[in-house]
Amino acid sequence: MSSQTQIFPDMPALCPETLCVSGLSLARGELTLVRDFNLDLAPGEAVLMSGPNGTGKTSLLRAIAGFIRPEAGTIRIGEHPPTIAAAERLAWLGHADGLKPGESPRQALRFWAAMAGQPRKAILPLMRALAIESVIDRPAGRLSRGQQRRTALVRVALANRPIWLLDEPAGPLDGGGRARLADLVAWHRSRGGSVIAATHQILDWPDARRIDLGTHR
Amino acid sequence: MNALGAVFAREARLAWAGGGGAAGPAAFFLAAITLAPLAIGPAPDLLMAIGPGIMGFAALLSVLQSADRLFGDDHADGTAELYLLSGATPAWLVLAKVMGQAVATLWPLPVIGLLGALMYGVPVETALVGALALLAAIPALSLIAGFAGALAAGIRRSGLLIALIATPMMVPVLIFAAGAGRSAFEGDERAVANLLLTLAVSLGTTALTPFGIAGAIRSRLG
């Protein structure tokens, strides 16, 4: 583990998991967003998906999470389709952060730790790792967009699940936030976790595979 | 069950986290039963006769008042997606959520209903039966409102749609709950039967509606 990843807490061991997407086609109404998309993701890998607006980055993540049904193709997380496997193997960061305006990060993260069956003791170290421990008791409605995003990233890490699906994870983050996000992803990968992120930004994630969805239509 | 307890507690806490908004249904209910005599007239016999009906009707509208936020907020802020990936059984989870909200925001309704009935001149025994009927009706009303709210989640200005979906589904519980109070006032032995029927509808709704709400949430994410 690198010196950067040592700032992250000890958490229960991950059960690394593979993801296999084959021949996937996604459509919105009459419009085909993704055609014959294939992806194999091994433990420890990271994939950065880019492409112009409307090329299906978010839809692809949502299909992997089991929120939308593909037109064709299969998705397997380990041996199972998302509908069976997702709840135990996927951690999700969507466009919205899943925060309630009247709830502080401490309250929200304690709740999500309980939902994931994970200990609360990792909350503060993870918030420190993302440099937001000073706002831990501030209502989410009074946090900046970047602070809200960092809180959501803590929630993703807290779930302690092997595959992270991140939709525009760095959208509202500043330079420091993007660096800490890169550290968080490196820590997760060092534990055998894997990451798929849809992004418009240039993210400096070492050894990450880059896929341009603009070529898959 | 830890996760469901966490959802229940969170909903009860969040109901009051944003200020006094959670008092909306109770305030609406109080306003409705207070204003009704001003519109109908102060004749004691009339108020005693229609009191149980007004209570049931006002409770129905009060529950609908916040139905758009129950699952609409979760849809907008991304919580619905996280719930579906949480690992908790969705039907149990939504039941815990709706009950958490109901306990936090609707508990005053039977109390206000009891006091309101007494204010109308209804005998104490009848007022108690009416309050019990309201208490028995709250789970059904809340879950039906939740179901309509989940179906309409993500739709702007969803209030009309929610009312159109929920109101017909609430008719049985409204008839039985108001009927319990009315029968008690008339000294009719059907009061207990109506009370039990209200409870039966609530239990049936509690058993079935969470599956519908969970399905609605998933379909709205697709």
Image (spheres, coloured by chain):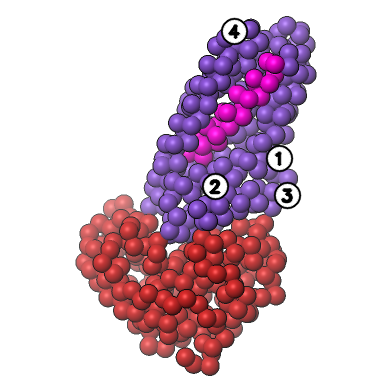
Number of residues whose C-alpha sits closer than 10 Å to that of mark 4, classed few (under 14), some (14–19) or many (20 or more): few
Q: Splitting the image into 4 quarters, where does residue A209 fall?
A: bottom left
Q: Splitting the image into 4 quarters, where does residue A33 fall?
A: bottom left
Chain B representation colour: purple
Q: Establish if B139 lies above or below A104.
A: above
Q: Establish if A204 lies above or below B169.
A: below
Q: Establish if A126 lies above or below B93.
A: below
Classify mark 2: helix, strand or loop: helix
Q: Are marks 4 and 2 on the same chain?
A: yes
Relative to the observer, which residue lies in front, B35 or A3?
A3
The residue at which mark 1 appears reads as: B23
Chain A representation colour: red
Query: Which contiguous range is marked in magenta?
Result: B125-147
State yes or no: residue B130 in magenta: yes
Classify mark 4: helix, strand or loop: loop
The answer for how far apart the CA atoms under marks 4 and 2 are is 37 Å
Q: Main secondary structure of the magenta part?
A: helix
CB-based contact (under 8 Å), mark 2 and mark 3: no
The residue at which mark 2 appears reads as: B97
Left or right: A10 in relation to A35: right
Classify mark 3: helix, strand or loop: loop
The answer for how far apart the CA atoms under marks 2 and 1 are is 17 Å
Q: Amino acid at mark 4?
A: Asp
Residue A138, numbered circle: none
Q: Amino acid at mark 2?
A: Lys
Residue B19, numbered circle: 3
Classify mark 1: helix, strand or loop: helix
Q: Are marks 1 and 4 on the same chain?
A: yes
The residue at which mark 4 appears reads as: B188
The first of marks 1 and 4 along the sequence is 1
The first of marks 2 and 3 along the sequence is 3
Q: Residue at x 51, y 84 (%)?
A: A183
